[in-house]
Image: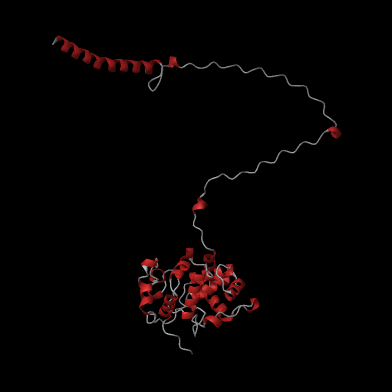
Amino acid sequence: MIEHRKGILFTLALMIAVPAITLIATVYQMIGTGGDGPIRASAVSEAPRQAAPPAAPPAPAAPAPSPAATPPAPSPPAPAALQPVPGRSAMDFSASRPDWEGFLRGADPEAGRLLAANGKPGAGVQACVACHGPAGITPTGGMFPNLAGLSSEYLAKQLADFRAGTRIQPLMNTVARALSEQEIGQVAAYYGTLAGPPLHVGEFGGEAARKLDLQGDGGRALPACANCHGLRGMGEGPLLPRLAGQSREYFTDQMTAFRNGSRQNDDVGVMRAFSQRLTDSEIAALAQYYAGPPPTPK
């Protein structure tokens, strides 16, 4: 029993002594040697100042040399060119804008109408109406597309691509290169104001074309055409063109160009990929589906 009490007393003594010793040591350190606590003035001593060395006597002036013997003073070295600092700047994260957007800025549709009607004879450019009709609708279909119903943005991009050679069609390459950037914007702005041809979409082409338009074919990774071109090809967004009302010949020609790679100005190659997954009969059915009934000759 006595030994048990002694053990308890020893443990209590340790529990009291250890914190007390730690507290005393901490107070001594703060007062005697500085730290985070108050600092005694006597603990900080100022370093003795060293006297400045006496100034050396001035050297005797050397005799001035004759002008003939004085060598020319060397020119100071040119400052080194500033080297670019590696890293990124704010401009690295700015979205780039296509050039054709600037063509449309402030474009006058009336000036575009006059250019479309008269052409640019001095540069060898015939009137647009000769191929695309007086209101942007080709009278008898064929290989010339209807421009009415297409957006100004889409038309400006296509003309810019013809001008740059990223879309190849010999006649249009020649025409676009003869037009200034301002004239491209004017023509695109004019045709963007015109309504498209009357619609009879979906009356021809059969069930296969209707399914491709509305549903696509998941097994071949073919999304519905309507996802990009709108229901029945009415267009979806400024750069996704309207298909409704284009002639069967023009639609088939462009799908063939995407398929064989002679047209390559589609966004990230999507049309080139999709056209290769379609059969010839499906392309023909879609051409009929979007074209509607054949035009009546006037």
Quadrant position of the N terminus in the picture: top left
Q: Position of residue 131 (x, y in %)?
A: 54, 81
Quadrant position of residue 84: top right
Q: Determine the residue positioned at 34% across, 16% down.
A: 25
Residue 292: horizontal and vertical position, in percent? 41, 82
Spot the residue most to the bottom: 298
Q: Say if residue 147 shows up in the picture.
A: no
The location of residue 152, given as percent across then percent down, is: 49, 71
Q: Nearer the viewer, residue 106 or 55?
A: 106
Total numbered badges shown on the rendered structure: 0
Q: Is residue 138 above or below residue 189?
A: below
Task: Identify the image's colour scheme: rainbow, by chain, secondary structure or one colour.
Answer: secondary structure
Q: Nearer the viewer, residue 115 or 8?
A: 8
Residue 270 in view (yes/no): yes
Q: Is residue 171 above or below residue 33?
A: below
* x and y, in percent, of residue 30 in the image: 37, 18
- Observer-nearest residue: 118 or 253? 253
- Residue that appears at 15% across and 9% down: 2
Which is nearer the eye, 226 or 208?
208
- Residue 154 lies left or right of residue 8; in this view the side is right
| 92 to 281, vertically: above or below | above
Residue furthest out toward the left: 1
